[in-house]
Amino acid sequence: MSAGEPTVAVVGGGLAGLAAACALSESGFRVTLFERRPYLGGRAASYEHPATGEVVDNCQHVLFGCCNNLIAFYKKIGTDKDIRWFDRMFFIEPGGRRSTLEPVRLPAPLHVTPSFLALNFLDAWDKISVSRALVSLFSRMPRDNGASFEDWLAQHGQTRNAIERFWKPILISALSESLDRIAVPYAAQVVRESMKAAGARSMGIPTVPLGELYKQAENYVCARSGVIRLRRGVDSFLPLETGVRLGAQGSEELFDYAVIAVPFDALGKLLPDGEESSRLREQISHFESSPITGIHLWFDRRISELPHAVLLDRTIQWMFHKSELLRKSAPSANGDDVPSYIEVVVSASKSLLQKSRQEILDLAMRELAEFFPQAREAKLLKATVIKEVNATFSPAPGIDRHRPSSPTPWPRVLLAGDWTATGWPATMEGAVRSGYLAAEEITRCAGKPRHFLVPDAKSEGLMRLLG
């Protein structure tokens, strides 16, 4: 052990690593965070795009009111003020017809019933079938029996229209995977958590580039004697009886503890040789990635007054009006004449991986014009396509059996990452939870236990009477 304050190396500057670093820094540990990239945030980062000269997020990220740990993390580092909250969700059909899902003053989960019943894109039988399925999901948490959520929907009599226009938009965007690759408990958790209380489904969208959010995390760590090392990748770690030796770009350093907060596909490259690593190697061999594609478009005029929208029946799934979301003040009276920045998102975008940039742009522009007629007259000033190939782990049936917990065979080495056993799917909330779990384990090992994990939101209204 080192003299004085225990030292901790955090490997990886994504949300999991940042959450662990902030929690440990405030607990009296001397933290050194290693990040191979020149910026923080991992798969939820922003950077200046060389071809456009614009600062872009690698993909649009949102949070919901049920993400208690992520919200607490933002409050801790002082960036909660940079999140704009929305209670209304807009759905648009090709041709431009709109529907709105919004809450009223009724107990959960009835608070969205009036607007659900008024949705234009579902007919009466669609709504009946969806309602029956929701009651089943609310009443009990299903187990993973190897079936996919697509199978579950078929067993519960869902209409084709309900699947295409209700279940797919909600779950593919939340879990970034096709319905035939989603385990039933993950889908159930998304639905139950978002409906358990009136504010649980409120959607929060950052009003600043993601990098600005995490700059505050860097400041938080550094203000507590921590060190952030960007462009400093870790090549290996060696567990010792009294610490952990890290190899980083030809040099070695010794720490009392280490949090390995890297994606599952990067962990295998760091694991030391030996039998103790075999179990972890076997676990990560079961994981697969799912991609997300962000299409960034700058127009010479505003193509919509909406801040965001779900886009139905086409390849593109969400529109985020970035110039409105990032706006520091209200739009001007002649806002339609000013340039407009739009991001279109395609989750589970396997069909786009082999397409060229131009093919994807052509597809996005063609489909966007079906939803927003103004796009037909607008001039595209510049554009870029960002494919996050390994955006999330695939929440396939059976994967929970292989998600490792934070403790490892080496008492001084902990794992973090949204793919570990957090109790949540691959989300920003899951990443923060994993960082807090790793930090809690280190404080326990060091003999000064702390608790960082925030409990899940409590059920309200009628949801308290259901499962």
Image (cartoon, grey):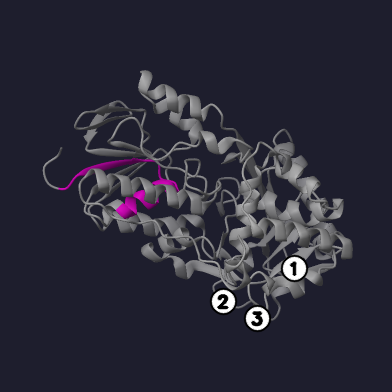
Q: Residues within 10 Å of mark 1 (few under 14, many from 20)?
A: some
Q: Nearer the viewer, residue 169 or 423?
A: 423
Query: Which of marks 1 and 3 precedes in the sequence?
Result: 3
Please tell me how crowded label 3 is: few (under 14), some (14-19), or many (20+) other residues with Cα within 10 Å: few
Amino acid type indicated by mark 3:
Arg
Position of 160 with respect to 202 (left or right) is right
Q: Which mark is residue 329?
A: 2
Q: Is residue 107 visible?
A: yes
The residue located at (22%, 38%) in the rendering is 256
Residue behind mark 3? 105
Residue 304 disc label: 1
| The quarter of the displayed image where residue 229 is located | top left
Q: Which residues are magenta?
A: 5-23
Name the element at disc 3: loop
The residue shown at (65%, 59%) is 139
Q: Is residue 21 rendered magenta in the image? A: yes
Q: Earlier in the sequence, mark 1 or mark 2?
A: 1
Q: Residue at x 27, y 28 (%)?
A: 239
**Amino acid at pointer 1:** Ser
Horizontal relation, residue 21 to residue 39: left or right: left
